[in-house]
Image (spheres, rainbow, N blue to C red):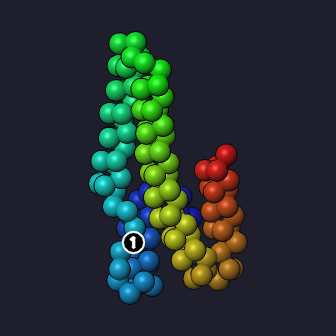
Amino acid sequence: MLGTWCQLTTQGMAQYDQVRGGSRQIMEKGRLIQRLKRIEGQIRGLQRMVDEEQSCGEILTQIAAARAALAGVAKAIFETYSKACIQQALTDEDGGAEVMEDLLQSLSRLIK
C-alpha cells in the first residue's frame, strides 16, 4: 500500500521516474516542509493580529491567504500520491483495485 510518505519519496519516485522517462515530477519532502513552515508563520501572524485587535478585514485577508497556501500543499501531496497510486495500479496483478479505492477515499477526504 502506498499510504506512507517514505514509500512515496523512495520507491514511488523510482517507479514514477522510470515510467516518465526520468523526469521527476514529485514534490521533494524538503520543499513541502518549507511550505508548511511558511504557513505556520502565517498562522502565528494571524494570532498576533487578533491579539493586537487589528481590523477584521485585514485578518480575513490573511486567513484567505493561509487557506490558499494550505490548499496548495494539499494539492501537491495529492498529486504525488495519485501518480504513485496509479503507477502501482498499472503494475498490480489484480488491477490495483485496493490502491485505487484508497486513492478515491483520499480524494473524498480532500474535497469535503
Is residue 16 visible from the viewing direction of this image? Answer: yes
Residue closest to the eye, 72 or 105: 72
Q: Circle 1 sits in a helix, a strand or a loop, which is it?
A: loop
Residue located at (54% from left, 77% from top):
87
Residue 50 in percent (x, y) is at: 41, 17
Residue located at (61% from left, 76% from top):
89
> Can you tell which quarter of the image residue 6 is in?
bottom left
Residue that numbered label 1 is attached to: 25
| Total marks in image | 1
Residue located at (37% from left, 62% from top):
27
Q: In which quarter of the image is the N terminus?
A: bottom right
Q: In this view, does 106 lie to the left or right of 77?
A: right
Residue 51 in percent (x, y) is at: 38, 13
Residue 10, above or below 70: below
Is residue 7 visible from the viewing direction of this image? Answer: no
Q: Residues within 10 Å of mark 1 (few under 14, many from 20)?
A: few
Q: In this view, does 37 lie to the left or right of 16?
A: left
Residue 33 in percent (x, y) is at: 33, 48
Residue located at (44% from left, 51% from top):
73
Given the current orientation, which residue lies at the most extreme bottom position? 21
Residue type marked 1? Gln
Q: Is residue 48 left or right of residue 64?
A: left
Residue closest to the eye, 66 or 93: 66
Residue 13 in percent (x, y) is at: 40, 72
Residue closest to the eye, 43 or 59: 59
